[in-house]
Image (cartoon, rainbow, N blue to C red):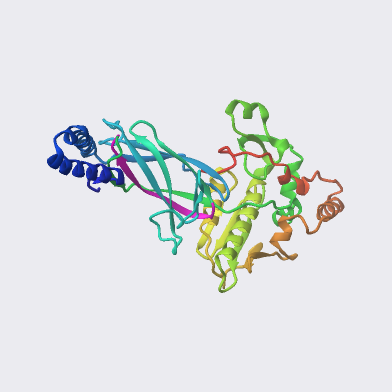
Amino acid sequence: MFGVSLTRRGRLVAGICLVASVAAVTAGGRSLNAVVVPGLVALAAGFVQLRGIDAPGVRRTGLTNGFVGEERTVATEFTGDPPGTDIGRPFLASVRDRLTDGLVALGGDGDLRGGDTADVDATTGTTGEATTQTTVGDAPARYRIRYDERGVHRVGPAQITATDVFGLYYRRFLLTGRDTVTVYPSVRTVPGWFRRRLSGGEGLDASQQREAFDRLREYARGDALRDVHWPTTAKRNELIVKSFAAETDRRRVSIAGETQPAADDDTADALASAIASVGLALLNDGVGVDVRLPHGDITADPGPRGRRTLLEAAARVDAGSLDGRPTPDVRLVAADGDVEVQTPAHTLAFSALADGALDPKADSDVRTAQTGSTGVAPTARGSTDQESQPTTTGSGGTPR
């Protein structure tokens, strides 16, 4: 907590009062009545107003986990003491919420990035702030932020600068409450032929025959548009899709992710995106995944909890190798900003795989091979399922 101090306007008013007092002594009392008395009254009233306020409590809402590039509106609410009670006397204030690097506050004068705003060391680029004007105790302070980098980021502490109604004094309070948010890496489309090869093919093809309806679930990135259950979607005001019984009867796929030595942050980001993309595509197909990473291993099963576990692990991916680990079904090796995808059948670049530039006839080749072995041509989804996903910003597409 800081004491009450004069603003630039307050210093100007105090200086005028001082000059007027000197003039009153030398020239007469009219200057005292016309200038000094109103000025002193304003100075006294402003001082009393700020001395009577206490540091409020702070609570943030709207700060939910999401993907790189998404935006959120954060509302900073202020409460009295004890927490949850109203502030007895509202007051004007400027609110400055600190943001760690990776979060961008969207302001009226342009983007306020980490290290670019006032009172922040621009050479380090490690912190930033979102600045808003509000009446503390009357309405929450609102601002928008964009998730610029994956990882676990912190918002807070908040510093509020209270001013009196005349703008003559200010008083600062540092509110120590902090909140964290996890930003997931970007997720790209993984074609159907590659997913079938990883999962063995039979489970995926059986699921596309849609033999038995199982349940309704929240929409996840990669779900086909034809699986959206529109009546339930309309009732809940969020995308709901149909799941089928065959989706629960598939084998697991092991994924290993690592980087080459001396990898930079861009390479680690590329690895995180590849892990999230491949793992999430398999989970959305109902295939469980076992992921091995330099900082630890995770196991994820189909469903919202498994998707959240995978994405949170991908958000924390660091550079490192997996020497001596067992051979996985697919190994992702990041180097020079791209990822090499290694399977027993082939080795290819993830950037080309996700862009659909590789193996354009793979779906027909897989179907031909399976038809020859079973005598029945299965109904395959192909590589267009994830490309037909509807756009959504609701809770179904983003694990919280």
Q: Nearer the viewer, residue 173 or 15?
A: 15
Left or right of 161 on screen, residue 112 = right
Q: How many marks?
A: 0
Q: Quadrant of residue 248?
A: top right
Q: Position of residue 351 (x, y in %)?
A: 70, 60
Residue 393 sits above or below residue 176 on the image: above
Q: Which residues are magenta?
A: 148-165
The overriding secondary structure of the stretch rendered in magenta is strand
Left or right of 105 on screen, residue 34 = left
Q: Residue at left 33%, top 44%?
A: 160
Name the residue at the front extreme: 27
15 is within the stretch colored magenta: no
- Residue 124 in view of the camera: yes
Residue 283 sits above or below residue 264 on the image: above
Q: Position of residue 1 (x, y in %)?
A: 25, 48
Residue 24 sits above or below residue 151 on the image: above
- Residue 252 in view of the camera: no
Name the residue at the left extreme: 25
Q: Residue at left 77%, top 40%?
A: 209
Q: Nearer the viewer, residue 306 or 163?
A: 163
Q: Position of residue 230 (x, y in %)?
A: 67, 29
Q: Position of residue 55 (x, y in %)?
A: 27, 41
162 is within the stretch colored magenta: yes
Q: Residue at left 44%, top 63%?
A: 124
Q: Quadrant of residue 228?
A: top right
Left or right of 107 on screen, residue 43 = left
